[in-house]
Every structure is written in structure tokens, then in C-alpha cells.
Amino acid sequence: MSDLQGNALNLIQEAKSVAIIPSKVAGADSFCAAAGLYFMLLEKNKDVYFIYQGKVPDAAQNILDHTRIVSDIGQRELIIKVDYSNTPAAQAHYATDRDVLEIRLGPVSKEFELSRVKAQLTGVDFDLIIVVGAQEVTDLGSVYEKMKEDFSQVKVLNIDNTRHNQNFGDENIIDVNAQTLSTLIFSKASEWDLTPGEKAAKALLTGMTYRNGNLGVDKA
């Protein structure tokens, strides 16, 4: 196994939360290759997020349930916690007025410390981003704009099969001899200790067949 393959294996094995992002411009092959990898990583009990904005390629409509696709990665949730232990508080009420939320909790004493009220933003924190089929990050569309901070803070595994790839990842798996991205993912699966199950196999076979979304058309 080459150093690059070993590094990719280490990244995948050590990652707990993985974002998989197919290129928006590489068609069904990129989408299906990413979906195949997504299903294989799920089998490894990883927290995996398939991030894609826009219309799913026609050839890939039945590959991945749309509820599994994360399209608005920039959204977060605001959580408010109140420690009311050792108080007589028994009721909580809330109301909204002109987009302002008001929460009332009581009764509490006048000595109640406001430091017991906490607010935090929650979201997904990735430790690995896998990009499939993008020659450069702009091929990811607005997803990259929303995830610039993530790209600058975590490891990026860049997988592609074109000679025009800009090697933007921390690790770059570029095989210009691979006829399709799905073929590339399938060929690397065993090296990365991954096994295609039924759903992964269906996704990869679809990508191999359609070759960037057009039956029988070779990659550029």
C-alpha cells in the first residue's frame, strides 16, 4: 500500500464525523460514487453526512433517500438551558411577539443567579471532509462558501479521476486511469477496509453505468 493510500486509510479509520460532498458539476457518477462511500462508512458506524445542494441527477434519483441529503449545512440550533434546581419553579411559559421569543419560568427568588441561564449554538462538527469528483472547490457550489471554516479546520480527502484536479485536499487520491469515480471508489474500498453492501453496490454500479450522467459517454 502506498503512503497516500495509507494516509487515506488512517483518515477514514480515525474519523468519527464525516462529511461527504459530491461535485455539483460531475453528474450522476460523482453523486453515486459519493453515495456508495456514504453507505460503506455507515456500515462502519461513522456519523456520516451526505451534503448536496440542488437537483439530484436523474440517474441517481433512487440511489439515496432525499431525507438523508443535507442541503443547508449552515443552519444551527440555539439551545437555552436553565438550572432551576433548589428553586420552587414549577411552571414554564413562552410567547412570541414580532419574532421575539420570551420564556417565563417561575417562581424563583429575587436572588436567582442569571449565570444559571446558558445559551449555546449546536451543529455538526466534522473531523473529516471527503470531496468526490471536484476538480477544484468551486465545483461544490455554495456548499463550499458555507463550509469555508470547516475546510480550513479539518482534514480534507480529495478523490477524483481527472488530470485537471487542483490537489486541494490534505490527501489527494487522483487516478486518471479510473474510467469512472464509482470505479475508483470501488477499487479503493478494500484498501480502506470498506465493504460494499447492497445499497453501496447499487450506487456504485449505477455510477459506473452512467459515467457522469450520460450512458456510454467517457469522462473528460
Image (cartoon, helix red, strand yellow):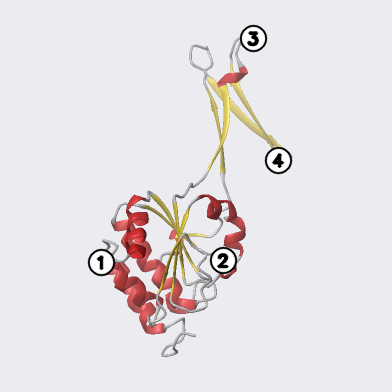
Mark 1 or 4: in front is 1
**Res. 196 in view:** no
Mark 3 or 4: in front is 3
Query: Where residue 170 appears, x then y in whole percent?
Result: 47, 59
Label 4 is placed on what type of residue?
Asp
Q: In which quarter of the image is residue 159?
A: bottom left
Please report whichever mark, 1 or 3, sits nearer to the chain's N-terminal start: 3
| Disc 2 from disc 3: Cα separation | 55 Å
Label 1 is placed on what type of residue?
Ser
Q: Name the residue under label 2.
A: 137
Using the image, tell me which numbered label, if any, was put on residue 190. 1
Q: Mark 4 points at which residue?
A: 99
Task: Answer whether labels 3 and 4 touch (C-beta < 8 Å).
Answer: no
| Disc 1 from disc 2: Cα separation | 27 Å
Please report whichever mark, 3 or 4, sits nearer to the chain's N-terminal start: 4
Q: Name the residue under label 3.
A: 110
Q: Which residue lies furthest to the bottom in this view?
A: 216
Task: Answer whether labels 2 and 3 touch (C-beta < 8 Å).
Answer: no
Element type at mark 1: loop
Please tell me whether residue 171 is drawn above or below residue 152 in the rendered image.
below
Please tell me whether residue 60 is drawn above or below residue 90 in the rendered image.
below
Mark 1 or 3: in front is 1
Q: Is 194 or 111 nearer to us in this picture?
A: 194
Query: Where residue 25 appears, x then y in whole percent?
Result: 54, 75
How crowded pointer 3 is (Cα within 10 Å; few <14, some 14-19, many 20+) is rated as few
| Disc 1 from disc 3: Cα separation | 64 Å
Q: Is 197 or 82 nearer to us in this picture?
A: 197
